[in-house]
Image: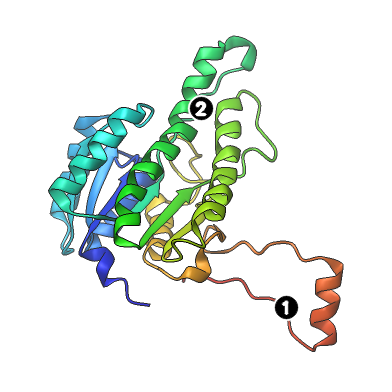
Amino acid sequence: MSTEWIKERASVVTGASSGLGRALALELVGRGLTVAGIGRDAERLEQTRALAAAQSGPGHFHPFPLDISDAEAVAAEFARIEDRLGPIALLINNAAIHPRQDFLDETPESFMQGIRNNLGGTVACTHAALRSMTQTGQGRIINVISFADQRPDPACGVYAVSKGAIRIFSRALVADLADRFPRIVLSDWAPGILATGMGRSDGIPPEQAAKWGATLALWHDPMLNGMTFDRDQQLLPPQSLGQRLKRRMMLRGPVRPLRLD
């Protein structure tokens, strides 16, 4: 399915000042997209812009400093992105903070500030992007997730709670929009443990993960709506015993996950 229309409109990547967000922005620019990069640190966003300008790819990077935990500021900045770059075709919700603090050393306010950034920022950016996407009738949204909520590490409550909630938010959004806007396609993507400040030194290079993420972002097909991808392949939903027996009786082989190769 052609995605040339995405290249003709604006793409937004949050957390584009470093790590995976920067790698995603550079990969998309290299593939010919016009990328609005969002981040708190204006100086680091300028570094991303300089790296994008040094590439040979046909795309362009535009920095937009923004605190995504401020929903009003998000709405205003997304309107400015539309004014400057045109309708929004793609949103990658990547930005997140990962404070490492025992809950007893937190305050309710500090804990909820982290939730406002990770979950609230994803909600605010998605809501703002959908104002454009619902006008054009098509769009692509990638929520960068993790499975930290399934077995939370000690002193990682904010990250675990917010990342688990983002997966629930994705399912709720698909339930609300899929019937009315089948060409606004949302997928969850878990890039794996990365070799970044939030990951570990022996993790996946963010440049490699960005290739998978960009491929998924440019794969616009309604069948992908609500799907979850883990690194470079689809995470298949569990099958009941009855479903497995039915496939065997019908002489069907095992379900093969979609891949981002």
Residue type at numbered disc 2:
Ile
**On residue 138, which mark appears?**
none
Q: Quadrant of residue 9?
A: bottom left
Q: Locate residue 82 relative to residue 178 in the image: left or right.
A: left
Residue position for label 1: 254
Q: Which element carries disc 2, helix, strand or loop?
A: helix
Task: State the residue in front, 33 or 152.
Answer: 33
- Residue 102 image position (x, y, % from top left): 61, 17
Q: Locate residue 199 relative to residue 38 in the image: left or right.
A: right
Q: Which element carries disc 1, helix, strand or loop?
A: loop
Give me the residue at 22% from left, 41% from top. 79
Give me the residue at 60% from left, 32% from top. 161
Q: Locate residue 62 relative to residue 161 in the image: left or right.
A: left
- Residue 184 image position (x, y, % from top left): 41, 61
Figure quadrant of the N terminus: bottom left
Contact check, label 2 and label 1, Cβ < 8 Å = no
Q: Nearer the viewer, mark 2 or mark 1?
A: 2
Above or below 171: residue 239: below
Task: State the residue in front, 142 or 126.
Answer: 126
In this orientation, does residue 160 appear?
A: yes
- Residue 220 image position (x, y, % from top left): 40, 68
Above or below 51: residue 5: below
Task: Tell me which colouring the rendered structure shows.
Answer: rainbow
Residue type at numbered disc 1:
Pro
**On residue 115, which mark appears?**
2
